[in-house]
Amino acid sequence: MRANIVTLPGDGVGPEVTAAAVSVLEAVATHFDHEFHFDEQQIGGCAIDATGEPLPKASLAACQAADAVLLGAVGGPKWSDPNAPVRPEQGLLALRAALGVYANLRPLQVHPALAALSPLKNEKLKNVDVMFVRELTGGAYFGAKTRTVTAATDECKYTVAEVERVTRRAFELARGRRKRVTSVDKANVLETSRLWRSTVTRVAAEYPDVKLEHQLVDSMAMLLLTQPGHYDVVVTENLFGDILTDEAAALAGSLGLLPSASLGDSKNGVYEPIHGSAPDIAGKGLANPVGAILSAALLLRHSLGLANEAAAIETAVDDVLSHGPRSRDLGGSASTTQILEAVLAAMQKSVCAASAFLHGSRANG
């Protein structure tokens, strides 16, 4: 397969973890006989410094023409003035809107070898395997905004069509998992949530094999910590999803472990670790690249349709998390490069073993 992948390393540790993910994708191309072309573009604070725009036109055009987009992180203290007219996060929102990636998938699993790093007791972490589906291009983040000396507003607006499409994505995912969907809203207070709940309920009737439950966002914040193993697919609106998925990330032991995929109706998606730019460790080679590497696996699976290649990356990461080395956020001392090298070595070993088994089976046949 040939594929064009745009990389947006961004700010802080973004370039370091993106480079690690690219190295893993290059290894995949070598092992599985693919041809991946990487086109590096700018986004975020570095783009503001270079062009005055958080998402330059050249970057957007490249992303629109690509098969997939691999993103690092945006932002940092240099661009943190909340009153600044141009901010790094504006580039991220503009990219999501332009590509129409309305469903943000954030898988959460707790690795057995890392359970002790979670703030929860180990018995609470058994069977935790949640797929969050966050609506990504509507709600308060994209609504009209006003600001005066004495007041400010952020409009939260949703249409039936926006809720329908992200709900269907959640139910389709649930059909391939444990067939349970939890929809999170604030329908006892917010009109947008009442629209959300009624629409989700109606769409659920199209999926009689999937069980639906509704949960208010405030109680869901508690239940994620008291019974995380209960949940399968969780679908919610933009702001609630942003908050809940960061809360849930703590269960895994580190923000540095978790990937995400932002998908629309086309194959082109945006893939990024859920962590931020971590400016305090930027340039020191200390960032955990696992979230970015697993995001590359999601890229292979969802945009390129390469499930076996994605599984090879995930198996290698699982091996490293089980046996080490570990980065500082996981209680170890390994550098970004050392984690990358360990993943590459584990992947090489796995691919070679699979190849030997295949050749042996053919010879015996």
Image (cartoon, helix red, strand yellow):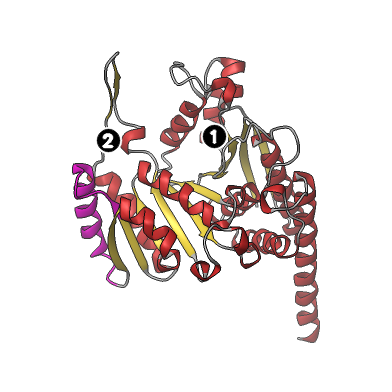
- Left or right for 16, reference 363: left
- Relative to 198, 152 lies left or right: right
Tell which circle, 2 or 1, labels the residue nearer the N-terminal end.
1
Specify few, some or many for label 2: CA neighbours under 10 Å numbering under 14, 14-19, or 20 or more: some
| Viewer-proximal residue among 360 and 237 | 237
Give x and y (percent) for residue 190: 21, 43
Q: Quadrant of residue 167?
A: bottom left
Q: Which residue is mark 1?
A: 63
Where residue 80 appears, as percent x and y from the top left, is 52, 23
Quarter of the image where one finds residue 180: bottom left
- Identify residue type, mark 2: Cys
Residue furthest bottom as drawn: 364
Is residue 224 positioned above or below 354 on the image? above
Q: Position of residue 189 (x, y in %)?
A: 19, 45
Q: Residue at x 43, y 55 (%)?
A: 132
Rendering coords of residue 81 (x, y %): 49, 19
Q: Nearer the viewer, residue 194 or 218?
A: 218
**Which image quadrant is residue 12 in?**
top right
Q: Is residue 192 magenta?
A: yes
**The C terminus - image quarter:** bottom right
- Asked if one can make out residue 169 in the rendered structure from this viewpoint, the answer is no
> Distance from label 2 to label 1 (Cα)?
27 Å
At numbered mark 1, what does the secondary structure look like: helix, strand or loop? Answer: helix
The secondary structure type at the circle numbered 2 is loop
Q: Which mark is residue 156?
A: 2
Q: Residue at x 44, y 69 (%)?
A: 177
- Find the magenta span and give its range: 184-208
Residue beneath the point at 36% across and 33% down: 141
Please report contact status of discs 2 and 1: CB closer than 8 Å, yes or no: no
